[in-house]
Image (tube, rainbow, N blue to C red):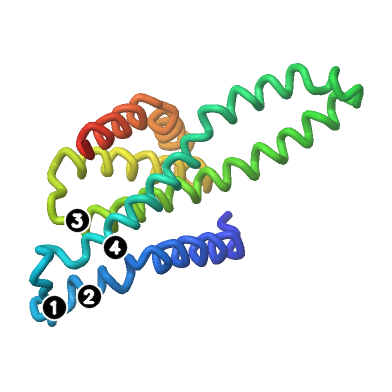
Amino acid sequence: MVKWKEVAIAILILSMVIMTCGGAPILMAKYSPDSGKMSDDNDDNPWEDGGESLGTAALVFLILTLSIVLWKPGVKLARKHLPDKLEMENRLVKKNIGIANRWFMKIHDWLGFGAALIGTLHGLLMDDWGLEFWIPMGGFWVLVTSGYLMRVKWPPKQVRKGARLLHMQRFIAIVSVIVLFIAHD
């Protein structure tokens, strides 16, 4: 079940990031009917600065999203060794680790959505984006969509298994990051 408070907070944070980077007004100006009248003699694309700042924000969101690479092994180690180190009841420590893990996964999901959304806006504002940029963005949207399907537990079990397998394939994320990195050089 979707928790509407969580959705509202996430949308508020994402919109603040996008507005802070100047993406929303610039994107609206670029695609407005009067956009041809706004020409800068020194620059072919007057929206490129806003696009670059959105790219920086998307990079930060992507790095934070990919922190799951360190989190998941850390959770495994904590479940295994932390009860002995803290000299507390095993069940209580594991319960608190589970609570922290659920919060992290919610944050991971929203950061991933933010990275994909802001990255897509970044691509729309940049003139020189070609297929080498849009294919990895498609990979990120596949990961975001499959992660959403896993989280809401909406589809039947067979679809969830497929989404989980697709989401767990680090191959898509690794290839997308590498291709984006190469394309940006």
Q: Quarter holding the N terminus? A: bottom right
Q: How far is the residue under mark 4 from the one under mark 1?
A: 15 Å
Q: Are marks 1 and 2 in contact (CB under 8 Å)?
A: yes
Using the image, tell me which numbered label, if any, was put on residue 22: none
Q: Is residue 36 left or right of residue 105?
A: left
Write the residue at 8% across / 76% down: 36
Where residue 65 sits in the image (x, y, percent)?
48, 40
Name the N-terminal-most of marks 2 and 3.
2
Write the residue at 31% across / 73% down: 25
Write the residue at 9% across / 63% down: 44
Q: Quarter holding the C terminus? A: top left
Q: Secondary structure at mark 3?
A: loop
Using the image, tell me which numbered label, if any, was put on residue 126: 3
Q: Secondary structure at mark 4?
A: helix
Write the residue at 33% across / 45% down: 141
Q: Are marks 4 and 2 in contact (CB under 8 Å)?
A: no
Few, some or many C-alpha atoms within 10 Å of disc 2 (few <14, some 14-19, many ≥20)?
some
Q: Mark 4 = which residue? A: 50
| Residue 72 in the image: above or below residue 127 | above
Q: Secondary structure at mark 2?
A: helix
| Residue 126 in the image: above or below residue 33 | above
Q: Mark 2 = which residue? A: 29
Using the image, tell me which numbered label, if any, was put on residue 38: 1
Q: How far is the residue under mark 4 from the one under mark 3?
A: 9 Å
